[in-house]
Amino acid sequence: MRHTPAVRGDDRRRRFEDIYHTNCTPILGYALRRTTNGEDAADVVAETFLTAWRRLDDVPPGDETKLWLYGVARRVLANYHRGERRKTELSERLSRDLALVHTDPGYTGRLALVATAFRSLSEADRELLALVGWEGLDHGEISAVFGCSRNAVRIRLHRARTRFAEAVGRSESNSPPEATGKFEATGKFEATGQLKGIGPAHLNVMNGDRA
Amino acid sequence: MNDLNQIAELSPISDAEVSQFVSDRTHAGLIAAITSTPSRSSAAQRSKARWLTARMPMTRRWLVAAPVVLGIAGAVLIANLIGRPGEHVGPINVGLPKARAALTFTHHGHFIDVIVTNPYADQKKYDAEFKAHGLKIKLQLVAASPSLVDTTVYFGGTGNFSGIKVITEKGRCFTGGAGSNCPVGIRVPLNFRGTADVAFGRPAKPGEQYETTGSAFARGEALHGLHIIGHRLGAVLTLMKTRHVTVAVYHTLKHGNDEVTISKAPSNWYVYDVIPWSKGKVLLEVGKTRHQPSAGPPTAGAPVPTPSPTGR
């Protein structure tokens, strides 16, 4: 799908441009960290900013803009992973720019065990932990993304961390001895195929926003 | 090691690494493409169409309506007592006369089926009918180039909007533009509490500019099957003439990344892209070099990003 260009020099467009330029990198990063290739990430980014444009009056100002966009991107990804992908030509050029970006690090050594443990968590737990570890959000910011209370985030995060620690423990106990006790990669556990799409392929989405 | 630090180590790519991949031109193109689509406040102003019967002379409307009103007055009275505007109660359409409604609302178990009865209705009419049912849903019927007619061109929202499903019906298209299995409405869960934006492509009215367009070379489009990208403008115009297609406007780059509109272009320039504009007209992206100038994506063989502590 292509949308016909038109000249719009009004305030709405200027505000959208400001929003886009300020937030395109974190939103693109968010999408790339949760998808396995640049093309998919481009679709998510285009859809997210298209939503921002269509709902411009709903976009909060200041620091909350990015959190609002994270929330939109999260829902776009949720749809995407439910098979409701809406491919648009809006993202064609972006896809071309990102064609060579691969977000499969191929974890090795202890990191591979950690990745296995992370992948074993529920989608909700993974997204919560990723927002902290990957996007660097605090409890208040995550509550804005999810639309729930700060206290709910604190409780959910505590539980998610507990489950993650247990999963890491299980992962370690199931692994050969040479893989444990070392954080640095040893090359013993090449994880490329096994861990492909660790976060993204099985999507980190919290269903039921309100705790 | 702290568990959150371990998760941070799994981050496939950091924001700092991300920023280098996308050119300024790509960003500018995406902004231009997005802002050329209808937004919530501007779309209502743009749509000036009125439902045909709303413009009928009052006497003619009465001639049509009077026998009907007399015949079903009692039933409508009962239906209005137990239903909401625009809703079906048995065979009765509650509220506005069916011929004037842009949408119909029908309860089915835990859902409300909303069917478009007039794809050319004023946007305010769709908005008002959803509002009357307490639904924060923006349904737009946008002028689409032929390959996108009778397709869902946008679907988004907040809250539990993903519970909303598009209703398609084979053989009930507004036109046959994209086949016969077309969106005719949406199914909304009764517990829907969020907001939703849905846009369906409809045929453009004569002379109306498309609001959403497919590839100019797609089936049904003006230049279906032609290969003109990268060719000189003079040759392209000759070819377009055989299809009775003209250029509405040219776009070219000025000072690197600024896309500007021009009314004419030299015939020895090259065509970079074609976008349907309205029936029989297209927009051409052109320039003096064979290949479109670009800041360019990262070079082949760029290193795979390594995990970073925070993803920032």
Image (cartoon, coloured by chain):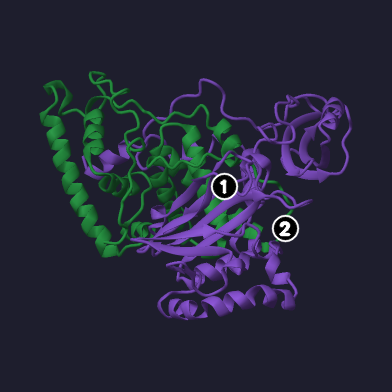
Q: Is residue B247 left or right of residue A118?
A: right
Residue visible at 65% across and 57% down in the picture: A13
- Chain B shade: purple
Residue indicated by mark 1: B153
Residue A27 spot, x, y in % from top left: 47, 46
- Residue A94 in sight here: yes
Task: Establish whether labels 2 and 1 are both on one chain.
Answer: no
Tell whether A50 sits left or right of B240: left
Residue B109 at what x, y percent from top left? 33, 61
Q: Nearer the viewer, residue B288 or A48?
A: A48
Using a 10 Å C-alpha cutoff, classify the residue at mark 1 as few (fewer than 14 neighbours), some (14 to 19) or many (20 or more).
Answer: many
Instruction: Say which chain tag 2 marks.
Output: A
Front label number (2 vs 1): 1
Q: What residue appears at the point 34 percent right and 56 percent down from the top-left corner?
A: A142
Residue B245 percent coordinates (x, y): 82, 36
Badge 2 crowding class, 10 Å Cα cut-off, few under 14, some 14 to 19, many 20 or more, is: few
Query: Which structural element holds mark 2?
Result: loop
The disc placed on residue B95 is none
Please indicate whether residue A80 sits to the left or right of residue B39 in the image. left
Identify the amino acid type marked 1.
Val
